[in-house]
Image (cartoon, rainbow, N blue to C red):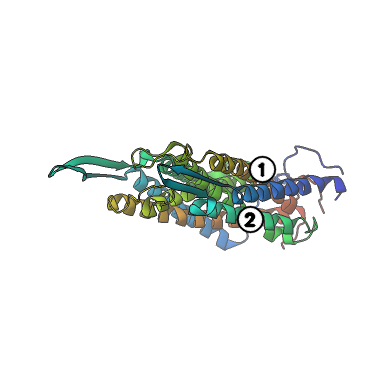
């Protein structure tokens, strides 16, 4: 029985739809996905609306201070732009997965559905972790500056900007944790499914 | 399980090991100094927390790869190692993403924040770090492929072993 290359996994050969025998996974997974969806959406929205305008004294000519109005926007830094885009993609993915959980049994995906969900979950974990960590280190640079490179810190002047960025980052890391848990549960679900069909004995 | 099926993951792990080790070593040996208007500019990787994080994560990933080269192919450990693979891959992705963000600021500066680019003053350091980042990015791609291989290993998807 030589394996054929490119054949769909054996989980789909049965025409009988396999239902999750483990009750906890059925109820836990949509709840976690909902939480992750809210976390990514809030991270994206808080960072996208991040803006602060401040009037600062930049120089003193004689005795009159020269004021300039400076604005801090999230678009000024590519890291924050990537953060917003990454969280947007993750929330789209979470929304899609939520819809699939509730309507997936209507379509006959032949079991590839769980595999695709696991792989897409892993890719989303990667994307969100990239976005969150880029924004984290850029924020760290903004808060502490870098004396060796002569880069000044900006958080002491634009405090609201930094606070909002903090909040968005916390939401994004929460989403990352939830997505990792979701991916692990998806993989466990996939293993149970695979075992229950191919070996006809649950591990 | 024929021997031929075990070679691609082993080769990939060897490649991943070499990518992460080269990223670490190239970053650690990056060093440059410049004298600009009586100000001495010494550029080392330890001056930036982001590059330190990049170095640490790549060192952890190379140690992980080294240990995994010796795990036999069909043991039950792979079920647990799949999750660990995912964690290490996502750590690598986060480290390369952060390092690229900081490297962009170093190369182009950020006029809104008043940060001047430093690559003009310390070009050797910048080239070295660029090389380390390229190796790190290659490591990320190879680790992602290894993740897909781990799934295949655990789930045995392409075989028709039916009871």
Name the residue beneath numbered marker 2: B59
In the image, B91 versus A11, the foreground residue is B91
Label 1 belongs to which residue?
Answer: A110
Please name the residue shown 41% across and 56% down the image: A170
User: Are labels 1 and 2 assigned to the same chain?
Assistant: no
From this viewpoint, is residue B18 visible?
A: yes
Q: Is residue B43 left or right of residue A59?
A: right
Pinpoint residue B77: horizontal percent, then vertical percent: 73, 61
The percent coordinates of residue B36 (x first, y second) are 43, 42
The quarter of the picture where the C terminus of chain B appears is bottom right
Badge 1 crowding class, 10 Å Cα cut-off, few under 14, some 14 to 19, many 20 or more, is some
**Which residue corresponds to the image point at 59% horizontal and 42% vertical from the top-left?**
B128
> How far across and down, in percent of the image, does residue A144 sit?
38, 55
Dot label at residue A40 = none
Q: Secondary structure at mark 1?
A: loop
How many numbered discs sit on the rendered protein? 2
Which residue is farthest left?
A63
Q: Nearer the viewer, residue B114 or B146?
A: B114
Q: Is residue B18 left or right of residue A146?
A: right
Q: Quadrant of residue B109?
A: top left
């Amino acid at each position: 029985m030589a394996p054929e290359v490119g054949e769909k996994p054996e989980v789909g050969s049965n025409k009988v739809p396999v239902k999750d025998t483990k009750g906890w996974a059925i109820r836990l997974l949509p709840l976690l996905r909902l939480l992750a969806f809210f976390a990514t959406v809030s991270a994206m929205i808080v960072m996208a609306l991040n803006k602060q305008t401040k009037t600062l004294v930049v120089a003193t000519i004689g005795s009159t201070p020269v004021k300039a109005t400076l604005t801090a926007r999230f678009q000024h830094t590519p890291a924050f732009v990537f953060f917003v885009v990454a969280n947007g993609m993750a929330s789209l993915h979470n929304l899609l997965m939520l819809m699939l959980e509730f309507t997936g049994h209507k379509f006959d995906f032949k079991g590839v559905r769980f595999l695709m969900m696991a792989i897409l979950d892993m890719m989303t974990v990667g994307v969100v972790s990239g976005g969150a960590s880029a924004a984290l280190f850029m924020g760290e640079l903004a808060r502490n500056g870098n004396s060796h490179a002569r880069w000044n810190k900006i958080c002491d002047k634009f405090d609201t900007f930094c606070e909002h960025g903090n909040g968005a980052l916390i939401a994004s890391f929460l989403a990352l944790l939830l997505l990792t848990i979701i991916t692990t549960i998806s993989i466990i679900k996939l293993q149970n499914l695979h075992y229950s069909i191919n070996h006809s004995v649950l591990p | 399980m024929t021997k031929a099926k075990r070679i691609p993951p082993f080769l990939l792990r060897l490649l991943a090991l070499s990518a992460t080790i080269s990223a670490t070593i190239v970053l650690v040996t990056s060093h440059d100094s410049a004298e600009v208007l009586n100000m001495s500019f010494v550029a080392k990787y330890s001056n930036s927390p982001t590059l330190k994080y990049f170095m640490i994560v790549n060192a952890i990933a190379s140690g992980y790869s080294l240990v995994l080269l010796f795990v036999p192919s069909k043991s039950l450990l792979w079920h647990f190692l799949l999750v660990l693979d995912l964690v290490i891959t996502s750590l690598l992705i986060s480290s390369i993403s952060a390092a690229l963000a900081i490297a962009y600021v170093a190369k182009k500066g950020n006029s809104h924040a008043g940060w001047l680019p430093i690559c003009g003053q310390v070009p050797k350091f910048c080239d070295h770090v660029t090389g380390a980042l390229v190796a790190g990015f290659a490591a990320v791609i190879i680790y992602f492929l290894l993740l897909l291989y781990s799934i295949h290993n655990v789930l045995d998807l392409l075989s028709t072993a039916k009871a």
